[in-house]
């Protein structure tokens, strides 16, 4: 197969640019994955580079699997020797091999979000701090952000009491992680960078191995990830980064848009290639998206174009309430499906916040239309799944205190919360962790602060765990999995619950995952299984095709595409979010979020808003999103007002079907006395010019404050 066949000129240039630093700015739908895959294949088949000398970093396990499958077909050879995966997966492999050089146990466990929260609560308890006063979730966020900036506990300032508490909790949290031989997700990155900086032999080993490094979704990297890439590329400088600043929407995960914007400063000889041809959307959808994003300053300008049909621009729909908004969406999807334009699975409804899904779900249920909500409880977060994983983690690493405390009384063994608190205190007094405390209890005799019944239960658990640890040296992952179920009595326990059959099916699904590792050596297989389930992400479990409508947040929708997209809540305070409006950098990210949503659509995109919406416990009249104003009226295919409420019909009935009036708009200022032909006399509260219009808010006696667009409303100065 000709690796360059079927590539457009820009894509071909990107594939062939293999020497030195390369920055590929890839617009949405521009065939980025195709370019990345062909580039690696070109290195192997055309230039003869050994797969072992190539590192390709993706942002999801799903993307890594897709790339591997494509490469095997394209390169007509095994690509197993390529280092291919996410930052976290690659760093985990490096630390398993070379982590002992900085004191990291090769059998470390990876703590997920729930585990981290549990450990922070434990830290607060050890420090006699109230978790109601210092929210564990907020502390976790601060600690995670600190690690993404390579900051240790001692680097945190103590300018306020909260900062001092955070420093102390961070310090204790790190101590507990070490006692458990555990790393959190941020540690996987931070510790790898520290490993390289503190051990030059280890760094030289990896720098010498990787002649070519390629990073996808570079706009979503944080400071640690960028530092890691620069270290690895320090010898050969053959680094290729692919991304789009206009799609950088994860600053809340510590992603730093400056990494891609400043790449040329760090690598002044970098070759910059623009991928601007779009293979996904109609031209009018692209034009609308370009007008929205053009107002941002932190970006690299691109001109999106397509050979697809001109198609339809956005449909802008205004409804009275969020209930009418949801009902209209359901009705429109039903109309499209009945007319044969699309199937249900072709449609996605996107929203800024998870809370917006409630009214949508009620409308879909009421109408009897099937849907899937991309949210809810992930498979690996289900209670029964986490229980079995906790047992397996304990077998691999019995020092894992979070897993031990999770399952020591599951199924119930007569070890209550009071006994567990006493166990923790006694272990601390003895200067050991809980696992070692259990071993001491089994051998200590009568001189213990526990009842004979509790001592028997604790000793029994310790003996069972020790037996499972010994058996793990000789059993494959599936046989070990079955032994855990048998020895713990978990099947009898879970099937006795109200929803036991469903929970047992989930456990059998997890057993199926264990099957993938049963042919490996016992210890190696268990480690690989636990690492695999620890690093799985939300999007990895998202099915490619569905027969039902997808309800999804805009953040989760990145990387996906649908023939028909509805974006609801196009209002000030929703999109852009009210927390971002006063921060220029955050406001630009909100604009990028809107841009991402629009560019998910292939054929149709609906931008829907409600005049009145319940928000944070109260009913509010919201202005249209400023992002709607950025779309010229000539790009809008159709718009309209839905609803017959008197207030809506008389005070804000704006039909997007009507062209903007060319007459000069009147100027007002706060305090002006005006007259409305229906509502009578009022006083101007505020006045704001927009791109194509002007908006005025007027306070009327008996009618309250009403907002108008002056191109439609008949308001005159008194």
Image (tube, grey):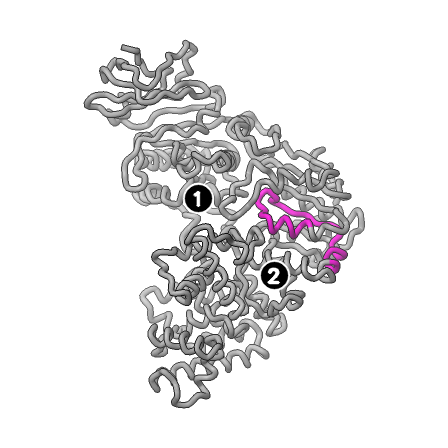
Above or below for 123 versus 250: below
From the viewer's perspective, tell me whether residue 459 is left or right of residue 217.
left
Read off the residue under disc 2: 92
Q: Position of residue 47 (x, y in %)?
A: 80, 47
Q: For the stretch drawn in magenta, what is the main secondary structure?
A: helix
Q: Closer to the camera, 717 or 510?
A: 717
Q: Which residue appears farthest toward the bottom when viewing the image?
A: 445
In the rendered structure, find residue 552 and report the number of the disc placed on it. Answer: 1
Magenta residues, start to end:
204-230
Q: Residue at x 46, y 41 (%)?
A: 554
Q: Residue at x 48, y 63 (%)?
A: 173
From the viewer's perspective, tell me whether residue 597 is left or right of residue 700.
right
Q: CA distance from mark 1 to mark 2?
A: 30 Å
Q: Residue at x 55, y 32 (%)?
A: 281
Give the mark nearer the N terminus: 1 vs 2. Answer: 2
**Tag nearer the camera, 1 or 2:** 2
In the rendered structure, find residue 252 and report the number of the disc placed on it. Answer: none
């Amino acid at each position: 197969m000709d690796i360059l066949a079927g590539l457009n000129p820009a894509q071909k240039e990107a594939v062939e640019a293999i020497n030195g630093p390369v920055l590929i700015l890839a617009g949405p739908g521009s065939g980025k994955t195709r370019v990345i895959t062909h580039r690696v294949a070109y290195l192997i088949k055309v230039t003869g580079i050994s797969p072992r000398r190539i590192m390709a970093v993706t942002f999801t396990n799903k993307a890594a699997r897709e790339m591997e499958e494509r490469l095997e077909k394209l390169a007509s050879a095994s690509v197993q020797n390529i280092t291919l995966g996410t930052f976290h997966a690659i760093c985990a492999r490096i630390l398993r091999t070379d982590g002992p050089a900085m004191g990291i146990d090769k059998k470390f466990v990876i703590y997920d979000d729930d585990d981290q929260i549990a450990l922070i609560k434990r830290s607060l308890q050890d420090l006699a701090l109230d978790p109601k006063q210092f929210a564990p979730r907020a502390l976790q966020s601060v600690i995670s952000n600190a690690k993404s900036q390579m900051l240790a506990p001692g680097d945190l300032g103590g300018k306020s009491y909260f900062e001092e508490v955070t420093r102390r909790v961070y310090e204790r949290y790190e101590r507990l992680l070490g006692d458990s031989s555990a790393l959190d997700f941020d540690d996987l990155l931070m510790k790898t960078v520290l490993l390289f900086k503190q051990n030059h032999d280890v760094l030289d080993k990896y720098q010498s191995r990787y002649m070519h490094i390629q990073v996808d979704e570079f706009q979503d990297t944080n400071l640690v990830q960028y530092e890691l890439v620069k270290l690895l590329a320090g010898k050969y400088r053959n680094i290729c980064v692919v991304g789009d600043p206009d799609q950088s929407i994860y600053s809340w995960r510590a992603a730093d848009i400056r990494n891609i914007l400043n790449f040329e400063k760090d690598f002044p000889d970098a070759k910059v290639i623009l991928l601007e041809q779009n293979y996904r959307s109609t031209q009018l959808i692209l034009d609308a998206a370009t007008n929205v994003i053009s107002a941002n300053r932190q970006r690299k300008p691109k001109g999106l174009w397509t050979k697809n049909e001109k198609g339809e621009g956005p449909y802008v729909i205004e409804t009275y309430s969020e209930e009418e908004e949801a009902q209209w969406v359901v009705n429109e999807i039903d109309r499209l499906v009945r007319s044969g334009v699309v199937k249900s699975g072709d449609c996605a409804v996107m929203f800024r916040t998870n809370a917006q899904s409630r009214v949508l779900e009620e409308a879909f249920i009421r109408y009897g239309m099937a849907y899937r909500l991309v949210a809810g409880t992930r498979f690996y977060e289900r209670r029964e799944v986490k229980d079995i994983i906790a047992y397996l983690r304990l077998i691999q690493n019995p020092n894992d205190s979070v897993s031990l405390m999770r399952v020591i009384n599951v199924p119930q063994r007569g070890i209550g919360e009071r006994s567990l608190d006493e166990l923790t205190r006694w272990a601390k007094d003895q200067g050991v962790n809980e696992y070692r405390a259990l071993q001491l209890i089994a051998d200590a005799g009568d001189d213990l602060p526990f009842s004979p019944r509790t001592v028997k239960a604790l000793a029994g658990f310790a003996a069972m765990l020790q037996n499972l640890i010994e058996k793990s040296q000789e059993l494959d992952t599936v046989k070990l999995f079955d032994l855990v179920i048998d020895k713990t009595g978990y099947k009898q326990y879970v099937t006795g619950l109200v929803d036991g059959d469903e929970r047992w099916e989930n456990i059998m699904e997890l057993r199926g995952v264990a099957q993938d590792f049963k042919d490996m050596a016992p210890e190696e297989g268990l480690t690989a299984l636990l690492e695999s389930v620890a690093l799985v992400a939300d999007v990895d479990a998202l099915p490619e095709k569905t027969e039902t409508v997808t309800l999804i947040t805009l953040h989760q929708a990145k990387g996906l595409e649908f023939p028909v997209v509805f974006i609801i809540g196009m209002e000030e305070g929703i999109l852009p979010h009210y927390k971002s409006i006063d921060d220029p950098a955050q406001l630009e990210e909100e604009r990028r979020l809107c841009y991402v949503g629009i560019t998910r659509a292939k054929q149709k995109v609906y931008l829907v808003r409600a005049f009145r919406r319940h928000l944070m416990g109260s009913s509010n009249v919201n202005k249209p999103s400023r992002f709607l104003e950025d779309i010229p009226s000539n790009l809008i295919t159709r718009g309209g007002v839905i609803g017959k409420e008197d207030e809506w019909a008389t005070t804000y009935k704006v039909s997007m079907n009507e062209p903007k009036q060319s007459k000069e708009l009147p100027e007002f200022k706060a305090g002006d006395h005006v007259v409305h032909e229906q509502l009578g006399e009022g006083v101007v509260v505020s006045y704001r010019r927009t791109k194509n219009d002007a908006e005025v808010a007027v306070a009327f006696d008996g009618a309250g404050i009403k907002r108008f667009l002056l191109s439609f409303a008949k308001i005159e100065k008194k």
